Image (cartoon, rainbow, N blue to C red):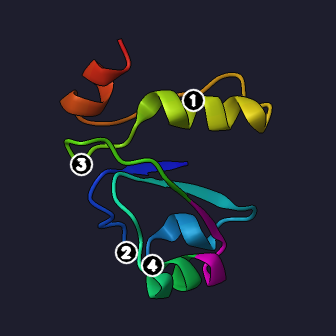
């Protein structure tokens, strides 16, 4: 899973070459072209923007729970980590 508020993850990122699907949480609405390209790369896009242009973490965590994902290991910057606590 990638949390990308601005939607700057490149399609060439190694994570898209790994087995399985990747969930890409965006803090903005993706264009139809972006959605198609990421889907072809094996990613599922979850658009959950806040007014500040960040990812709505509450919505993201609910979506993970619906997928029966009950624990996450987070690596990120100060804004992401601070938002989780």
Instruction: Determine the secondary structure under disc 3.
Output: loop
**Residue 51 in magenta stretch:** no
Instruction: Determine the secondary structure under disc 2.
Output: loop
- First in sequence, mark 3 or 1: give its number: 3
Pointer 2 residue: 10
Circle nearer the viewer, 3 or 2: 3
- First in sequence, mark 1 or 4: give its number: 4
Residue 72: horizontal and vertical position, in percent? 59, 27
- First in sequence, mark 3 or 4: give its number: 4
Instruction: Determine the secondary structure under disc 4.
Output: loop
Looking at this view, is 79 or 47 the one in front?
Answer: 47
Pointer 3 residue: 53
Span shown in magenta: 39-45
Pointer 1 residue: 61
Is residue 29 shown above or below 42? above
Looking at this view, is 14 or 1 the one in front?
Answer: 1
Q: Residue at x 57, y 84 (%)?
A: 36
* Measured Cα–Cα span from mark 1 to mark 4: 24 Å
- First in sequence, mark 3 or 2: give its number: 2
Is residue 18 shown above or below 55? below
**Is residue 11 in view?**
yes
């Amino acid at each position: 899973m990638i949390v990308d508020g601005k939607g700057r993850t490149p399609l060439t990122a190694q994570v898209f070459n790994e087995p399985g699907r990747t969930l890409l949480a965006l803090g903005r609405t993706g264009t139809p072209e972006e959605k198609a390209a990421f889907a072809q790369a094996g990613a599922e896009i979850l658009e959950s923007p806040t007014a500040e242009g960040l990812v709505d973490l509450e919505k993201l965590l609910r979506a993970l729970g619906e997928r029966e994902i009950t624990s996450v290991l987070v690596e990120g910057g100060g804004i992401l980590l601070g938002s989780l606590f």
